[in-house]
Image: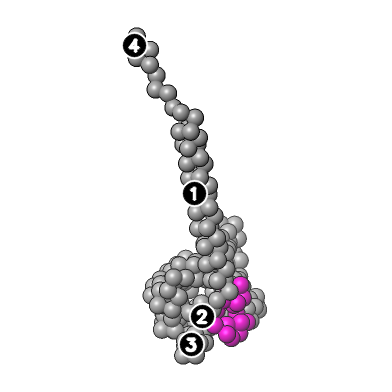
Amino acid sequence: MAAGVSAPRHKPAQICARVLFVTQTGCAMNDLDRALADIVEIKSRLARSSEFLGLGPAALAASGALAFFVAMAQSVLPGAADPTPYFAGWVVTAIAACGLIGAEMLRRGSHHHAGLADQMIREAVLHFVPAGVTGAALLAFFVQYAPADLWLVPGLWLILVSLGIFAAARSLPPGMIYAGAWYLLSGFTVLLLAANTHALNPWAMGIPFALGQCGIALLVHRATEAN
């Protein structure tokens, strides 16, 4: 230190006050973090235990109509039932259907669930993510390692849709379990019918999805009217 200049001295009371302030601030921040985490957990529990009203009957019916028209187009266009155009058509159809349903879900979720909209939509989507990822992985696997067995994929896709519906049934409108049963039965029926010919049939996708989506639209419409 330079000559004649002394270091500032803090009184013990000042030091104790500063230590107490820092300690109290840290405790307050921890309490705030815990409170915010509790709020998020409560919202997640409410979302899991509440009926999700974000599904729109119009979008669901439109996705069923889209499946019907894609099947009709593939059944009349030359070469459309070959593996590459067949699965490309249905992958694009699935993406378009998810876009329609998702856009309606965002709009209706904000309207019906207000502050819980984000959690409700998240919980609803998470039920179907495993089925979607598994379906994409199955297609990639069969294309790469078992192209002769691609006839299995449509039936397996239908079964995966049924599992997604069953997983989400608790938070969906009443009667949705019947839609899951429809897709499950359709999946095994498609596998049984294709077992002899090993052929890709556009209507094996078109009919189950057209009727299934329109049936779900009816269930959602009734639930909306009831609420």
Which residue extends farthest top? 3
**Type of the residue with mark 4:** Gly
* 126 vs 44, nearest the viewer: 44
Q: Which structural element holds mark 4?
A: loop
Task: Name which residue lies at 48% across and 79% down.
Answer: 53
Find out whether the residues at labels 4 and 2 contact each other: C-beta distance under 8 Å: no
Which callout, 1 or 3, points at the residue further toward the start of the chain?
Answer: 1
Q: Nearer the viewer, mark 4 or mark 2?
A: 4
* Amino acid type at image mark 1: Met
Residue tagged 3: 227
Q: CA distance from mark 1 to mark 4?
A: 43 Å
Residue wearing tag 2: 209
For marks 3 and 2, give the one nearer the viewer.
3
Q: CA distance from mark 3 to mark 2?
A: 27 Å
Q: Position of residue 191 (x, y in %)?
A: 63, 76
Mark 1, residue position: 29
Q: What is the magenta range?
A: 166-181
Mark 1 or mark 4: name the one nearer the start of the chain: 4
- Looking at the image, do the residues carrying marks 2 and 1 touch, with CB atoms under 8 Å apart? no
Residue 190 in which image quadrant: bottom right
For the N terminus, which image quadrant?
A: top left
Sequence-wise, which precedes: disc 4 or disc 2? 4
